[in-house]
Image (cartoon, rainbow, N blue to C red):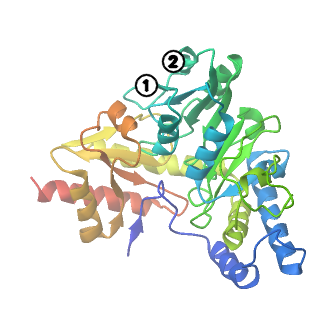
Amino acid sequence: MMRYLDNAATSAQKPLSVIAKMWKETLLTSVNAGRGAHRKSLRAVNGINKTAESLARLFNIADPSRIAFLPNATYALNLGMLGALSPGDHVVVTAMDHNSVLRPAALWGNYTIVPAGPDGFVDPGQVEKAILPETALVVCTHASNVCGTVQDVKKICEAAHECGALFMLDAAQSAGCMELDAEDLGADLIAFSGHKGLLGPLGTGGLYAAPDVELRPVITGGTGSLSESLYQPDFMPDILHSGTMNTPAVMALGTAAEIIENPEEIFVRERALAKDFEADLKNMDGVIVYGTDGDNRNGTVSFNVDGTDPAVLEEYLDRQHRIIVRAGYHCAPLAHKALGSGKTGSVRVSFGYFSTDSDRMAVSDAVYDFLNAHR
């Protein structure tokens, strides 16, 4: 029996209804949505719109047309950041952000990185201090993909707005498995993955832009609208919908969104597994656990065995116990530096929708066996 505990990368296990929808629509709707008025094209458009409506209900978004579908959260973050900024603008990011935020900021050039503490928290007051008169955008991850720390993004959003800047939320680790209320949060932009907590197929994600947010197109091309013009449409979602969309996958994402009725229940269950696993680890000599041990965390735990390369433990868990985890830097090098694992990276166990207490006990026992075998 294989136990999959790398849900922060992707939820490799999908509900059967999502798989069935993907298969069905691959047969029936493998056409180019919005290109033409024939019945198959219209079916594709209706399916995409239905998924937008399902996500809008889940995220409390009033206008589903403000959601654009993209291949992943990385595309969404890039298009949102680079599309919101103009020459001379300054952007604020944090040390806990993923490279999908840090690299676009570095590409832009005019940016400030707000540090994080060893518990993985970013102080909203430090974010406010980093905002300059020319700051146009503040970006922050909702939950760390390294250690699971959940940031106080509402306070960070308020700090950005008080200084006249837009706020962009990286919801790659929270969409679907944590409560995400766009209206209450007030974020101007929300980038999300479809294939992680939302339980959708690989190659799905999206970007929400609030009604008053104007974006510059970064990628242009055919959208099926205003085809007589040489210029990209300036309205959502078409401004971001250049080229052929993976319609069957987007429609299957809609099926997944309908399954998730209460993200907070999922969050509480995954957090409980993570906290119990962390308690197990802290009872073992030679194990170092990173990040917060409080309630402001999700189902991800990052740790190391003293004197052991994380990749060695990852391979051991896979080969000897058929447990899938991830080792390394998890595309977030500054987060590791803040947490104290900057020299090696870490082993990451991330619980998900299908994870059980049996999985938690199995990985705890496997780490304990590794310790005994290498003493």
| Residue at disc 1, secondary structure | loop
| Residue at disc 2, secondary structure | helix
Asked if residue 140 shows in the view, the reply is yes
On the rendered structure, is 197 left or right of 120? right
Residue farthest to the left?
375
Are there few (<14), some (14-19), or many (20+) residues within 10 Å of tag 2?
some
On the rendered structure, is 6 left or right of 340? right
Q: Judge by depth and name the residue closer to the eye, 209 or 327.
A: 209
Q: Is residue 250 shown above or below 286?
A: below
List the residue tagged with mark 1: 115
The residue at 78%/61% (across/down) is: 223
The residue at 62%/49% (across/down) is: 76
Horizontal and vertical percent position of residue 89? 62, 25
Horizontal and vertical percent position of residue 251? 73, 69
Q: Quadrant of residue 23?
A: bottom right
Are there few (<14), some (14-19), or many (20+) residues within 10 Å of tag 1?
many
Horizontal and vertical percent position of residue 222? 75, 62
Q: Judge by depth and name the residue closer to the eye, 200 or 282.
A: 200
Horizontal and vertical percent position of residue 14? 57, 69
Earlier along the polypeptide chain: callout 1 or callout 2?
Answer: 1
Asked if residue 237 shows in the view, the reply is no
**Disc number at residue 289?**
none
On the rendered structure, is 270 left or right of 50? left
User: Is the C-beta separation of discs 1 and 2 under 8 Å?
Assistant: yes
Q: Amino acid at mark 2?
A: Gln
List the residue tagged with mark 2: 126
The residue at 80%/45% (across/down) is: 61
Q: Quadrant of the N terminus?
A: bottom left
